[in-house]
Amino acid sequence: MSLPQISVAETLAQKIVALKPGALPAATTRKCEDLLIDVVGLCVTARNEDYIRSALAGCDDDGPCTAIGHARTLTAAGAAFVNGTAAHGEDFDDTFEGGPVHAGAVIVPAVLAACERHNPDGRMALIGIAIGTEVLCRLSLVVPKAVHKAGFHPTAVFGAMGAAAGVGAALGLGAKPIVSALGIAGSMAGGIIEYLAEGAWTKRLHAGWAAQSGIRAALLARGGFVGPRTVFEGVHGLFHGFAHTADGDYDALIADFGARWVTDTLAFKPYPCGTMAQPYIDCARRLAARGIKAEDISEIVCEVAEGTVHRLWEPLAYKQRPPNGYAAKFAVPYLLAAGFVHGGVGLGAFTEQAIRDPRVLALTAKVKFVIDPNNPYPNNYTGHIHATLMDGSVIEERQPYLRGGAQEPLTRQDVVDKFALNAQHGGWRRPQSDAALKLMAGIYDGRIDLSSLRG
């Protein structure tokens, strides 16, 4: 098979280097500001969790870079790993609805750490975060749903590529080394979804691993290391390996890159759990708001997308009684029932005590699903439930889109309020939170200095 004269990565790299600091649309800049606020808050909220303690204990690469919320400093790659793992750890981070992928938890930690160590220019950090986010999101559109279906986590696979692009841009690499950085990152990408079996922690590290991989790939390329230019479309390339096909819509990645920004549509979650479950929580809350009691319900049937079943619904008995708090984040029967019983799903819904709440478990046993062949996933995340009451009557609730997404985005104040709650949950006092917000408000216009985010 003959190789293309100009590869997909080469076309993409030319478009990346053509984007200069100060040239971003206002909406994209604003979204990158929101991403920064959100990610820092998520790092703080997870800083005392057991999986972050373990992640730090597993790092032996101390250096000058900031692990947000911690006094200990690490290498750029180490800081990106810990911050990415923390930002994704509670599953409360942003989502690109077309993917689904989680960009902020990968790209923000990667670019911040790289800039803190190698190029502390806020303008370059901004362009790097925008480019890395855009690459990650657009990659998820090339062969929709195929990576998940093959058993891999798209955020992990595409995250390494997006981080390499974002860090490469932030460090001012030329087109040729960016191509190599993408090619190198292709050999660093990975992330199986077997965490679903028992609620193991590995999904949490996928964002952090992708972030540090992007840094390492970009630095290797900067040093002259060569990666394959056909990393995307090659017969042994990224999509062949992780989507089981090299046939994809590569125009979704490169055709209007830099002219139209899908980054602008990123969604911020209202609940700290799996994205596709969130509209069903909204439906359950509205059902409870009608004055219906859990004991009044005989059965709840949810109409769902076929592509979500293997992650959020099966095996059903397991999803009705998840074995631990992390598994509960990806169990719609539990999430729906918790939202109904408690009026919402917050960070406290995933403690060992919370997932054993007999009122919630009594309702989870009544939750079932049917596949709706016309469900628009992954282009839109919807919720639809039929509740049959003990008297035989049926009540339906629908949620036509993801709150916090493109059709009902969060305001800047919503993002700030979420940050404040996350910071409080992580043990930061109000003065420290206010100082962090002030720092972030000007970080893209000045010098990158994250030292005040330590501890």
Image (cartoon, rainbow, N blue to C red):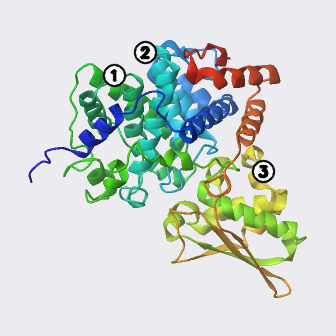
Q: Work out how far the residue at label 3 is from the one at label 2, CA to CA, in angstroms.
A: 44 Å
Amino acid at pointer 2: His
Which residue is tagged 2?
A: 118
| Other-residue count near label 2 (Cα within 10 Å), few / some / many at <14 / 14–19 / ≥20 | few
Please tell me whether residue 111 is drawn above or below residue 89 in the rendered image: above
Q: Quadrant of the N terminus?
A: bottom left
- Residue bearing the label numbered 3: 354
Q: Position of residue 331 (x, y in %)?
A: 63, 59
Q: Is residue 184 left or right of residue 258?
A: left
Q: In terms of secondary structure, where does tag 1 sit?
A: helix
Cα–Cα span, label 3 and label 1: 44 Å
* Circle 3 crowding by C-alpha within 10 Å: few under 14, some 14–19, many from 20: some
Quarter of the image where the C terminus is located: top right
Mark 3–mark 1 CB contact (< 8 Å): no
- The residue lying toward the viewer, choosing from 128 and 213, is 128
Type of amino acid at the residue the image marks with label 1: Leu
